Structures are given as structure tokens and as C-alpha cells.
Image (tube, grey):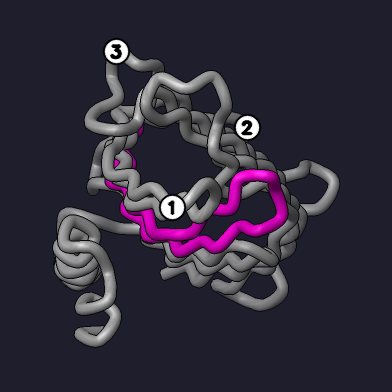
């Protein structure tokens, strides 16, 4: 873990430390329950995410880290990103749940096209999610997320951010889920008209529930 922190940009290195502390504290804290740890990988990116709920409330807390290297588009980008988020949620139809909230995102991006440009910045994105258990078979689930931040709530080099993902899940064994999905993440930088495509790929994932 320390070696990973050393090679990350300073801001994301600190974020990685905070991520570890938050997960450790969340697992041990009696104020949090029903935690999940997700790991997903695609051809160009990998993401780890922790999510939990505060006891006796409908407020969900999440934190995540991603690493990406996307050479599939005209603009070649690689780097790291992280986020922390809060969402107000509500149960619908038994185990299904929907939520609305915010995520504070941080990006460190190397744009390798046109001689190379370093991008540092982030955005306070607004959005939500829906996690649906199919009534015909509770082992099958559908999850979708969408977050967006315009220039007004983006900072430093980032002027716009958007993320959308959808995934189908199967409860393979108790407390473990496998997922197949699609994720699209893009940022606009330096007030340019063209977005940087961080990821727009299918992915495989697993989730551990505790």
C-alpha cells in the first residue's frame, strides 16, 4: 500500500491514505452497518469502492479509487481518480433502494496526446443511483448510477464531469455478488469543447457484502 501511495500524485496519495483509514474506521464503527466492498475491472480501468449506511438512518456513505489508462480514443489519457460521497436513500419494494446525493471527485490525469499535458482538478457532482432486486428472482439485481457536475461546481483544470454506469448482478454465493456492466466517465478540461474519455467500456466486478 505504501508503494502505491508513493507513485500516486500527492493529492491522490493522501486520498489513498484517507480511503484506508475510512474503510478501517467504517468496518469497526458501530454507527455504520451493511457495508459493501466492490472491485471492478475493464480493459482500461480498475476501481475499488466501499459503501455503507449510517445506523438508523437512510444516509449512505461511499468512497472510491480508480486507476485508468485509456489509449483507445484519439486523446490518450492515463492517471488516477478518487471520490467521497453521501446519498439520502429510500427502500422501495422490499430490498430495492434508490438514492440521491453528491460526490466530491478528484482527478490527476496525464494527457499523452499533443506533447503531454498534466490535468489536476475535480468536481462536486450531483446524481444518484437505483439498486433493484428483480421480483422473479432475488439473486438477480440491476444497479444504475449517474452523476454530473457543470463548470460552476468543478474546480482547477476540470470544467465539467459526467459519469454513468449500469450493471447486472448475480448473487453467486452468500454475501458475494458478481457483476457485468458498462461505465462511461468523462471530464472536460481547460474550457475545451472536447471531453476526455476516462472510460467507456464494459466491466466485470465482484462485491463482498458484510
Q: Which residue is mark 3?
A: 152
Mark 2 or 3: the one toward you = 3
Q: Earlier in the sequence, mark 2 or mark 3?
A: 2
Residue under circle 2?
93
Task: Choose the circle earlier in sequence order: 1 or 3.
Answer: 1
140 left or right of 117?
Answer: right
Question: In which quadrant will I find the N terminus?
Answer: bottom left
Q: How many marks?
A: 3
Q: Residues within 10 Å of mark 1 (few under 14, many from 20)?
A: few
Q: Nearer the viewer, mark 1 or mark 3?
A: 1
Vertical comparison of 82 with 101: above or below: below
| Coordinates of residue 4 in the picture (x, y in percent) | 29, 80
- Identify residue for label 1: 116
Q: Nearer the viewer, residue 112 or 142?
A: 112
Q: Earlier in the sequence, mark 1 or mark 2?
A: 2
Specify the quadrant that holds the C terminus.
bottom left
**Is residue 175 placed above or below 59 in the rendered structure?**
below
Magenta residue check for 77: yes
What's drawn in magenta, residue-wise? Answer: 60-87
- Measure the alpha-carbon separation of dots 1 and 3: 26 Å
Q: Tell me residue 36's x, y (percent).
A: 43, 62
Q: Could you tell me which residue is drawn at 52 percent across and 68 percent down?
A: 39
Above or below, 45 relative to 83: below
Q: Where does the image place residue 10, in percent across and percent down from the top left?
A: 16, 62
Amino acid at each position: 500500500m505504501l508503494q502505491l501511495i508513493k507513485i500516486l500524485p500527492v493529492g491522490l496519495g493522501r486520498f489513498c491514505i484517507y480511503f484506508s483509514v475510512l474503510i478501517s474506521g467504517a468496518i469497526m464503527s458501530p454507527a455504520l452497518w451493511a457495508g459493501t466492498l466492490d472491485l471492478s475491472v475493464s480493459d482500461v480501468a480498475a476501481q475499488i469502492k466501499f459503501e455503507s449506511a449510517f445506523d438508523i438512518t437512510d444516509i449512505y456513505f461511499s468512497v472510491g479509487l480508480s486507476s485508468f489508462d485509456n489509449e483507445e480514443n484519439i486523446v490518450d489519457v492515463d492517471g488516477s481518480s478518487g471520490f467521497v460521497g453521501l446519498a439520502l436513500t429510500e427502500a422501495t419494494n422490499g430490498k430495492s433502494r434508490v438514492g440521491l446525493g453528491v460526490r466530491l471527485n478528484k482527478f490527476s490525469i496525464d494527457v499523452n496526446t499533443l506533447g503531454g499535458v498534466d490535468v489536476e482538478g475535480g468536481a462536486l457532482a450531483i446524481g444518484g443511483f437505483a439498486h433493484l432486486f428483480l421480483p422473479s428472482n432475488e439473486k438477480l439485481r440491476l444497479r444504475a448510477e449517474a452523476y454530473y457536475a457543470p463548470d460552476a461546481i468543478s474546480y482547477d483544470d476540470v470544467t465539467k464531469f459526467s459519469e454513468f454506469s449500469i450493471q447486472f448482478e448475480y448473487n453467486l454465493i452468500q454475501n458475494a455478488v458478481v457483476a457485468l456492466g458498462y461505465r462511461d466517465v468523462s471530464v472536460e478540461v481547460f474550457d475545451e469543447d472536447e471531453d476526455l474519455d476516462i472510460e467507456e467500456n464494459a466491466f466485470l466486478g465482484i462485491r463482498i457484502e458484510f
